[in-house]
Image (spheres, rainbow, N blue to C red):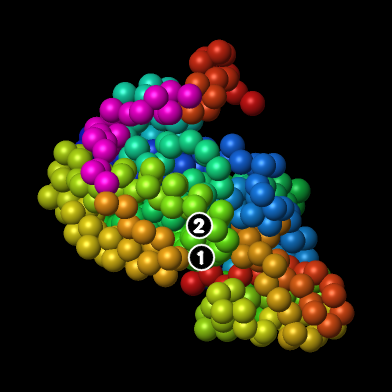
């Protein structure tokens, strides 16, 4: 059967949710929104993933992790990276955004607020440590392709911001 | 669709991204500040992501055992179709930023059109990469203005870099035989139509940065037809070293 993302059988869903982003271990691939399609034929699973950033090395690891997670549960899995539809940060679930924040990465804002924060020095990104929006952009590019580096001017904590990608 | 023409066209798209990506990767650990170092290598990573998508598709078109790595590593400089601009050396930070800015403006305009390609795969790659390219344009435009309108020394260095690199820009919006054929076949972009928006954006930014638009003759540049400056051979010597030394080696 071809499962849409809303009717994936519980067991398959549970296995998918054990696979996390290798660089952001609190975020499952389901919450990251990179699972595009799942096909189930008895014990054979086909999973389509869509890459976040084109050059992100985590995508290779995620594919290997999906295959391994299903093998452990007695399935044979195949994965494929597809480019269409292009991933956007809107695909990150609310649960995923909350997990990012707890982990110390400010979740993506909407496109207008994001532009203000990254281009016009707008103080709109909330510090993940103290919640203040009195924060400054340090660099548009951070430790991974998806993040920018910010600093809180109140508690002085540096933190990552997950850039809006649309 | 003529697969051979699509293949040739993909090379011209992919080689620009790969050669500039390599130039930026040379700066890993050498950026003027940690944040800039990370930014330049991030952009490099985006470009390599883009070229992998192109070359994986090209390898599939070629069929047989061909892989993306074969396409990257088993061609010599006469078989590369990148424009001359992207192979120019990292002389100093002003050159790095100027080269980046000029390419980013072109890259963004070209991907904007490629999104509407009749070739679904090329359209999908463009839709994916343009989101990242938007960040590249912001980054390089910002630096052009900061340095051009900065101190007397930064202004002088920027003007020197602009004078040396602007002379290679005509090639960007002058279609090669492959680009013309791809456009006529419906899946390629209309390169000549990029001239006006390219010059508008570049001139406007240079003016805002208080830099002078060079009044210099454009250099003869036929990189897109496979005729390169000596710079490309230095790049390929390093980039392809392992495959040339140990043919078909794998990690």
Q: Is residue A76 visible?
A: no
Q: Residue at x 57, y 20 (%)?
A: B242
Disc sitting over residue B155 in the figure:
2
Q: Nearer the viewer, residue A158 or B95?
A: B95
Q: Residue at x 67, y 84 (%)?
A: A123
Where residue B235 sits in the image (x, y, percent)? 48, 28
Is label 1 in a helix, a strand or a loop? loop
Q: Residue at x 34, y 48 (%)?
A: B166
Circles 1 and 2, Cβ within 8 Å, touching? The answer is: yes
In the rendered view, does B230 fall on the left or right side of B251?
left
Relative vertical location of residue B103 with respect to residue B88 in this rendering, above or below: below
Q: Nearer the viewer, residue B62 or B49?
A: B49
Where residue B181 sits in the image (x, y, percent)? 15, 43
Q: Is residue A135 visible?
A: yes
Residue topped by disc 1? B149
In the rendered view, does B199 fall on the left or right side of A125?
left
Relative vertical location of residue B128 with respect to residue B219 in this rendering, above or below: below
Name the chain under label 2: B
Which residues are the magenta region? Answer: B216-234
How far apart are the two marked residues, 1 and 2, measured between alpha carbons? Answer: 6 Å
Quadrant in the rendering for residue B28: top right
């Amino acid at each position: 059967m071809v499962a849409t993302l809303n009717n994936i059988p519980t067991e398959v869903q549970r296995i998918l949710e054990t696979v996390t982003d290798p660089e952001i271990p609190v975020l499952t691939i389901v919450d990251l929104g990179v699972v595009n399609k799942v096909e189930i034929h008895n014990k054979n699973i086909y999973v389509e993933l869509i890459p976040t950033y084109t050059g992100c090395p985590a995508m290779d690891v995620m594919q290997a992790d999906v295959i391994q997670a299903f093998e452990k549960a007695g399935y044979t899995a195949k994965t494929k990276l597809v480019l269409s539809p292009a991933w956007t940060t809107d695909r990150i679930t609310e649960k995923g955004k909350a997990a990012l924040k707890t982990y110390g990465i400010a979740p993506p804002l909407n496109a207008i607020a994001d532009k203000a924060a990254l281009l016009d020095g707008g103080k709109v990104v909330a510090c993940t440590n103290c919640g203040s929006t009195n924060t400054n952009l340090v660099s548009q590019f951070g430790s991974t392709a998806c993040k920018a580096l910010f600093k809180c001017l109140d508690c002085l904590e540096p933190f990552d911001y997950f850039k809006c990608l649309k | 669709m003529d697969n051979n023409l699509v293949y040739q066209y993909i090379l011209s798209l992919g080689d620009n991204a790969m050669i500039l990506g390599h130039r930026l990767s040379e700066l890993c650990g050498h950026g003027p500040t940690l944040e800039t170092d990370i930014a330049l290598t991030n952009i490099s990573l985006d470009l390599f992501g883009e070229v992998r998508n192109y070359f994986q598709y090209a390898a599939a078109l070629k069929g047989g055992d061909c892989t993306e790595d074969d396409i990257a590593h088993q061609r010599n400089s006469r078989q590369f179709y990148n424009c001359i601009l992207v192979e120019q050396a990292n002389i100093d930070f002003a050159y790095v930023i100027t080269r980046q800015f000029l390419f980013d403006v072109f890259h963004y305009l070209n991907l904007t059109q490629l999104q509407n390609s009749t070739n679904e795969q090329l359209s999908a790659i463009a839709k994916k990469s343009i989101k990242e390219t938007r960040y590249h344009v912001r980054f390089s435009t910002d630096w052009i203005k900061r340095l051009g309108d900065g101190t007397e020394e930064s202004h002088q260095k920027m003007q020197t870099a602009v004078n040396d690199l602007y002379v290679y820009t005509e090639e960007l919006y002058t279609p090669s035989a492959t680009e013309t054929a791809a456009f006529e076949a419906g899946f390629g972009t209309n390169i000549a139509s990029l001239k006006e928006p390219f010059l508008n954006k570049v001139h406007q930014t240079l003016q805002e940065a208080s830099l002078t638009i060079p009044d210099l003759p454009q250099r003869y540049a036929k990189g897109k037809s496979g005729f390169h400056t000596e710079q490309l051979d230095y790049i390929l010597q390093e980039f392809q070293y392992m495959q040339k030394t140990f043919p078909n080696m794998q990690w």
